[in-house]
Image: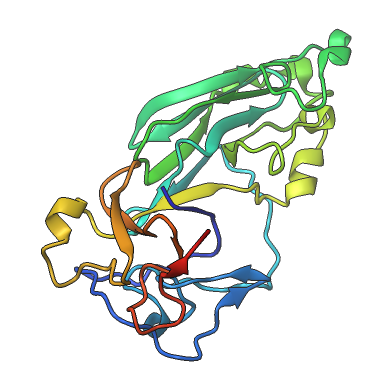
Amino acid sequence: MSSFHILAVLPWLCTAVSAGDPLPNCERSCGGVEIPYPFGLEPACALPGFNLTCNTTGVHKPMDEMNWQLNLRDTPYRLSDFGNKFTAIGCETLAYLDVDGKLTTGCVATCQADDLASLTDGVCSGIGCCQTAIPKGLQYYGVLFDSSFNTMEIYNMSRCSYAALVEASSSSFNFSKNYSTSSAFNDHYGGQAPLLVDWAIGNETCKVVQEKSNYTCVSKNSECVDSLNGPGYICNCSKGFHGNPYLKPNDPGSCQGEVS
């Protein structure tokens, strides 16, 4: 399953995906991150639905809402069940993952004023921080806090609670004991904790789409792989080859040359 870190995404919606070569001289990076086809920073440089917006400026305001949502419906993207964990931070914090009005999962983070020594850097197992897995195929999620858990008993110790889907990798999120008792979490991430999304092309299986004109695994020595997280498929170079399987064989960036 192909994945990438979430950026500012502006989907270019279309009823059907069609294969084709991107225009030459397309911009292929944003903030030092490579943007390979089928993604692009202009509609003519991307497959329909894979146009991204590169935004390197702006001030992001902290969120102070009790309820918050992320909606990826009608896009090729879905939240990675393998790469993300639903994460809550605070003392006396109960947060839920809300999917279409249904509380699908959640966790409780607790700590006591007389035992803050139990908070441990790098450990997110219920003391000041909790994490839980999410279902496959999610294209929408909301966060809901149980306000009854944020009581006056811990007001002077921990005035804020946080919850979000966060990339599970320790290199992206590493709990600090200061996160539960101060604004350090929001200060560190600026309201933008890293999130991993999967993507796939269309909503058909390889067996079905290989017989159609809009099949996008157009490179020689490429193969189709069914999505493991929701409908659709992705393309890979065949074993022993390297390059971009979405580019036509005459493109030097397509699947080329055997790899030893």
In-front residue for pair 218/19:
218
Does residue 211 lie above or below 3 as drawn? below
In-front residue for pair 125/185:
125
Asked whether residue 203 is in view, the answer is yes
Which residue does the image show at 43% across and 41% down from the upper left? 141
Which residue does the image show at 54% across and 23% down from the upper left? 146
Q: Looking at the picture, how far across and down is residue 163, in whole percent?
A: 60, 34
Does residue 98 lie above or below 62 as drawn? above
Q: Looking at the picture, how far across and down is residue 208, in whole percent?
A: 12, 55
Decide if residue 14 is on the left or right side of residue 30. Answer: left
Residue 185, located in which quarter of the rendered image? top right
Type of colouring:
rainbow
Which residue does the image show at 33% across and 79% down from the upper left? 249
Asked whether residue 204 is in view, the answer is no
Decide if residue 77 is on the left or right side of residue 109. Answer: left
Residue 159, located in which quarter of the rendered image? top right
Does residue 120 lie above or below 34 as drawn? above
The residue sitting at the top extreme is 114
Does residue 86 lie above or below 227 as drawn? above
Decide if residue 254 is on the left or right side of residue 191. Answer: left
Q: Looking at the picture, how far across and down is residue 229, in whole percent?
A: 35, 42
In-front residue for pair 249/95:
249
Q: How many marks?
A: 0
Q: Looking at the picture, how far across and down is residue 84, in whole percent?
A: 53, 38
Which residue does the image show at 56% across and 37% down from the upper left? 66
